[in-house]
Amino acid sequence: MVSAIGSWKTAMMRNSLRFTVALFFSVLTILLLVAQALGVKTLAEAQEEKLIAALIRDDMASVLKSFEADRTLLPPFDLRANGYVSVADHESITLPPAIKDMAFGTHELIIDKREIHIAIAPFGTARLYRVYNFSIYERHFRKVINTLMASTGLFALLTIWLAFGLSRLLVRQVTDLARQVKMLRLGESAPIQPGRYDETELAGLVEAFNDYHQRMADMIAREKAFTGDVSHELRTPLTTIKTSCELLAQDAEIRGKSRARLQQIERAADNMRELTNALLMLAREDSAREVEPVAMAEMIETALAPFADRLAQKGLETVVDVDRKLLITANRPALAIVLSNLMDNAVRHTEHGHIHFRYVNGWLSIEDTGPGIPTDAIPYVFDRFYQAEPPGDPPLGVGIGLSIVKRLCDRYGWPIKIGSEPDKGTCVSLRLPVTIGT
């Protein structure tokens, strides 16, 4: 749990504008500092070599002049090197035998883990070797360079700290704007005042957002008015039709085809009412939070009641294999609409056999013994207006029922899946959460 929270915080920081700005300034400044430090190091090393070369050149000129003026000052002759070996700091150094083959000029050698400079010049028929040991100077030079690189690292850390502080100042108004937008989303109706933002770009963004928010608010108001009108203007005549059908059904003189027509009108009114309820529920944004414990078996029986006559006419058996004590957490009206549409689909396409309801491991399954669905049609059954009837057969619906079912399931977080084989029936499975404690 702790690692998950840490990962979430890390992801939030990586995606934040403040982190992006701070990272950009930090990387840019660190790159400039490193480039500057490397440049200074390279320049210092080049100047060091020039200084050493100049010192050796001046010293060699002076030494050669003094030795030519007074040969008694010459150092001992080294037979191995075939020349005179003079040490600048009077420190005893053993030169390698290969030195006698080196060209005239200045060379750098590593002797006894020390960096030694050797200047070789002609002296009569022999050679003059002048040995310089700048190890102490170069150690001090390296300390200075290391101090420079270390200070670059400290400045880099300081840069990161300053970048985050500066980024907070740069994005503070963006953060404030995000907070006000969140307040608007949570119900604040007053527009955001662009005058409180100093940056021209943010002021323009606020004005554009206020315009967009106002248009959205107007659209939502129109939708609320429309759904209210639909709720009133459609439910009232549907109730009148339903009541009239019930009164006409009590008239014994209505028989045969007239009674069948009357039953069709009543079923059409019921379907229209359920469709209206489903569309109105999908239009309500806050309906997803209205959940309660629901008795599953009772819910199924209630949803089956309107289909009793059609089930009896087809001779279909219904089996409810659900524990009557089972409680699930759901929005009752939404679940009623989903069950009604799934049952209507099963009854409409099943001519004989049974419809079986079972609840296993959190999944409610509705199985029928209908003709099944072609394998290539299963991926599209939830598409709006899609119908899987074979070509030439009259459509048994308008292809909107399963689309509404899928939208309601997505709204309330109920995974749904369909399994079917031609001539073996269809099984629709719906995952519903069990109420804790049942």
Image (cartoon, grey):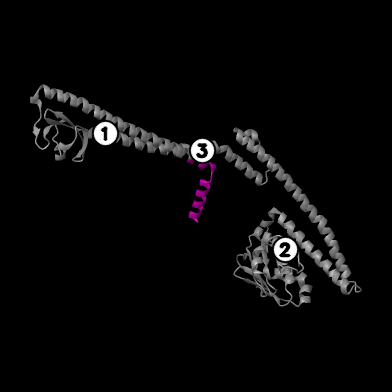
Q: Nearer the viewer, mark 1 or mark 3?
A: 1
- Residue position marked by numbered label 1 in the rendering: 140
227 relative to 97 in the view: left or right: right
Residue 17: in magenta span: yes
- Residue position marked by numbered label 3 in the rendering: 167
Of labels 3 and 2, earlier in sequence is 3
Along the viewing direction, whichever of 234 and 332 lies nearer the viewer: 234
- Residue position marked by numbered label 2 in the rendering: 401
Q: Residues under labels 3 and 2: Cα distance? A: 53 Å
Question: Does residue 35 show up?
Answer: yes
Q: Position of residue 24 (x, y in %)?
A: 48, 39
Of labels 2 and 1, earlier in sequence is 1
Q: Position of residue 216 (x, y in %)?
A: 70, 45
Q: Residues within 10 Å of mark 1 (few under 14, many from 20)?
A: few
Q: Position of residue 231 (x, y in %)?
A: 79, 56
User: Residue at image x 51%, y 38%?
Assistant: 167
* Residue type, mark 2 in image: Gly
Q: Residues under labels 1 and 3: Cα distance? A: 40 Å
Along the viewing direction, whichever of 153 and 403 lies nearer the viewer: 403
The part of the chain drawn in magenta is: 1-23
SS state under label 3: helix
* Residue type, mark 1 in image: His
Q: From the image, which quarter does the C terminus lie in?
A: bottom right
SS state under label 2: helix
Identify whether 25 is placed above or below 248: above
Q: Nearer the viewer, mark 2 or mark 1?
A: 2
Residue 227: in magenta span: no
Instruction: Name the image quarter holding residue 413.
Output: bottom right
Q: Residues within 10 Å of mark 2 (few under 14, many from 20)?
A: many
* Residue type, mark 3 in image: Ser
